[in-house]
Image (cartoon, helix red, strand yellow):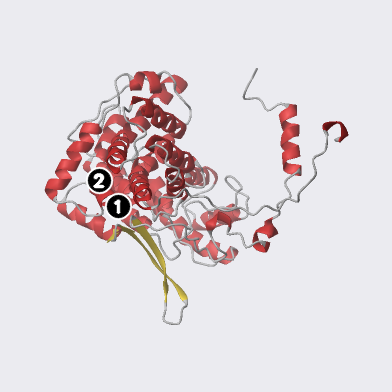
Amino acid sequence: MNYSEITPYIEELAKKSCENNNIKAEMYSQYDVKRGLRDANGFGVVTGLTEVSNVKSREVDGDGNVIQCPGELYYRGVNVKELVKGFLKSGHSGFEETIYLLLFSKLPTKEELDEFKNQLAAYRSLPPSFVRDMILKAPGKDMMNMISRSVLALYAYDENPDDISIANILRQCLLLIAQFPLLSVYGYHSYQHYHNNNSLFIHFPKPEYTTAENLLYILREDGKFTPLEAQLLDICLVLHAEHGGGNNSTFTTHVVTSSGTDTYSAISAALGSLKGPRHGGANVKVVRMFDDMKANIDTTDKAQIEQYLRDLLDKKAFDNAGLIYGMGHAVYAISDPRAEILHSFAKSLSVEKGMEDEFVLYETVAELATQLIAEKRRMYKGVSPNIDFYSGLVYKMLNLPYELYTPLFACARIAGWSAHRIEEIQNAGKIIRPAYINVKNTEKYVPIEERK
C-alpha cells in the first residue's frame, strides 16, 4: 500500500468532514471567544505569570488611553538593546550570557560566565553512535522533524529521564541547549548527502568556540568564518532566544510542562509548534519573496518595486497570500527592537560580503511596504519591519541554507523554552486546561439499521 496516496475514499471522507463542520466565523463574536487568545484590539488574553521576559509596545496615559510606543524587549528585566550593547562593548559573545540570564535571572560575573561556558562545552556532544544510528541511518527531508525525532530519541539515552526536580530539568535543558546545534547541522548534512548526493562530512565542535562559532564551524566544509560573521550570528541567537512568553511555542512549552511530562516531550512539542509557517518559518518566506521579486522585476526601479508590493497585497504575486512577509508583528506596532538591532549590523555585513545593493533593496521595500500596508489595510496598530525581515537577509549573507533557518531559530529559542519550563514547574502546580464552548446540538442515537 502507498501510505502517502490520498485515495478517492479519503477524499470523500475529507469532504464529509468539511460538510459537517457548522462553526461559522461570526460565532466567535457571538460567544465572545478570543480567537488566537487575542481580543479585537490585538491584546493577548492573560494565561499566566512570568519573570522570564517582557514585550512592551503600548503605554497607558493618565486618562486610560492606550498609546503605541516604540517596541522594547526585556530579558529578566534587562533591556535587550542594553544587553547587546554591553557584551559588544566588553568584546565577549552574547548568547551564552543570555542563556545564563534567562535561566538564573541574573547577569553572570566573568568567573560565572567562564564556568558556565565550560559546562556547555562539556555537554556539546551526542551519545556514542547517536549520529550514526539516529541521524545518518534515518535521514529526513525536514530538519525540524529530524530535530524533534532526535530529541525524543535522547530520552532513551537519559538514565533519569522522568525526574522533574529542578536540578534534573536544568541538567536536561543544558544538555539540549548544547546539543541543538549538532542535531540541526548534522541533520542537514545527512539530508544533503542522502537526498541530494553531496559529500558527507561531520566536524566535531571545538570546546573553545562559542555556540555561534561552532555552528559556522561544523556547518562549513572548511570550517572557516570571519569574526563579523560569528558576531552577527551570535546576535541573531540572542535576539531569538526569548520573546515574552506569549508566543505559540513557549505557550506550548507551558501547556505540555503543566501535565508533568518529561523535558524531551515538552521540548519536542515546542519544536512542532515552531515548525509551523505561521511561527518559525517566516524568515524563509521573506528571502523567497525577495528571490521572486528579483526574478520578475527590475529591483533598481522604485516604481516597479512599489507595483510588485501592491501585487503582493492584492494576491497577484509570489504565493498569492496577500502578505508582504517580514512586515508587521502581532504585538509591535511602531518598531520591533530586534529588527532595529539587526538592521545596523546587517548593513556592516553587506559591506563585507559585497551585497550593499541587496541591503538597499531591503531598505526600499521596508519604506514602501509600511506606506502601502497602511494605505490598503484597516489596522488597529501600525506596521513596521519585524525581526524576520532582517534575519532572513543576515542568514542569506552568511550563506546559510534555507533548510536551517528555522532550526537556527530553535537553537536560540531552546534557551527561552528551558527558562519557561523551569518556571512552570516551580510555580504552577496545575495542569493547563482551556475551555471550549460546545455549539453542537444534542442528537439521539440512531440504530445502525435505521441510518441513512
Residue in the picture at 51% in, 64% down: 371
Q: Position of residue 362 (x, y in %)?
A: 42, 53
**Mark 1 burial class by Cα count in 10 Å: few <14, some 14-19, many 20+:** some
Horizontal side of 449 relative to 296 (left or right) equals right
Asked if disc 2 and disc 1 are in contact, CB closer than 8 Å, the reply is yes
Mark 2, secondary structure of its residue = helix
Instruction: Decide if residue 236 is in sight here.
Output: yes
Give the amino acid at mark 1. Answer: Phe
**Mark 2 burial class by Cα count in 10 Å: few <14, some 14-19, many 20+:** some
Q: Position of residue 195 (x, y in %)?
A: 47, 22
Q: Which residue is mark 1?
A: 345
Among the 4 quarters of the image, the one containing residue 61? bottom left
Q: Spot the residue most to the bottom.
A: 63
Which quadrant of the rendered structure holds the C terminus?
top right
Front: mark 2 or 1: 2
Residue in the picture at 23% in, 48% down: 97
Rendered image: mark on residue 88:
none
Q: Position of residue 114 (x, y in %)?
A: 15, 43
Residue in the picture at 35% in, 42% down: 414
Q: Position of residue 27 (x, y in %)?
A: 69, 58
Q: Which residue is mark 2?
A: 231
Mark 1, secondary structure of its residue = helix
